[in-house]
Amino acid sequence: PTRRSSDLDVRRAEKEARTADDRLRLAAYYDYQARLKQAELTDQEQLVNYWGKTSMATRTKIPNPYWNAQALARLYREQLNTLTKLAAKHRKMAESLQAGAVTTQ
């Protein structure tokens, strides 16, 4: 599937989520995406460290791999933060739904 259809599927799943299991599946999806993003972030941080030890760190001409790695690391860090928050949000919603189910039984 394409990324666009995957994004649409996730948005649809969020709208249609009714049960704790639905929310836990969404949390697992976001946890998985966060792990992938963490790997990308680690790669970019390693590139920042590598290029930072060379003359690229002070080079003003573009393209500059040091600046690119810094920008990508910053972007991936923000995306990782968002994915982590989404996973936590869905886990919390699942806990609320599970607690509600226990009190109604």
Image (cartoon, rainbow, N blue to C red):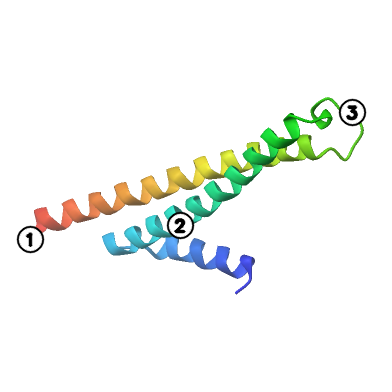
Q: Nearer the viewer, mark 2 or mark 1?
A: 2
Query: Which residue is at a point 34% across and 58% down the rendered structure image?
Result: 23
Q: What is the crowding at mark 3: few (fewer than 14 residues within 10 Å), some, or many (at least 20)? A: few
Query: Which residue is at a point 49% across and 50% down the rendered structure image?
Result: 34
Q: How many marks?
A: 3
- Using residue 6 as the reference point, say whether residue 29 is left or right of it: left
- Using residue 6 as the reference point, say whether residue 61 is left or right of it: right
Q: Where does label 3 land, which residue? A: 60
Q: Where does label 1 land, which residue? A: 105
Q: Amino acid at mark 3?
A: Thr
> Is residue 80 shown above or below 8?
above
Of residues 26 and 46, the one nearer the viewer is 46
Q: Position of residue 1 (x, y in %)?
A: 60, 74
Secondary structure of the residue carrying numbered label 2: helix
Query: Which residue is at a point 83% across and 29% down the rendered structure image?
Result: 55
> Marks 2/1: CA distance?
33 Å
Q: What is the crowding at mark 1: few (fewer than 14 residues within 10 Å), some, or many (at least 20)? A: few
Q: Is the Cβ of the residue at disc 2 closer than 8 Å to that at disc 1? A: no
The answer to whether residue 19 shows anywhere in this view is no
Q: Earlier in the sequence, mark 3 or mark 1?
A: 3
Q: Position of residue 35 (x, y in %)?
A: 48, 52
Q: Amino acid at mark 2?
A: Tyr
Secondary structure of the residue carrying numbered label 3: loop
Q: Amino acid at mark 1?
A: Gln
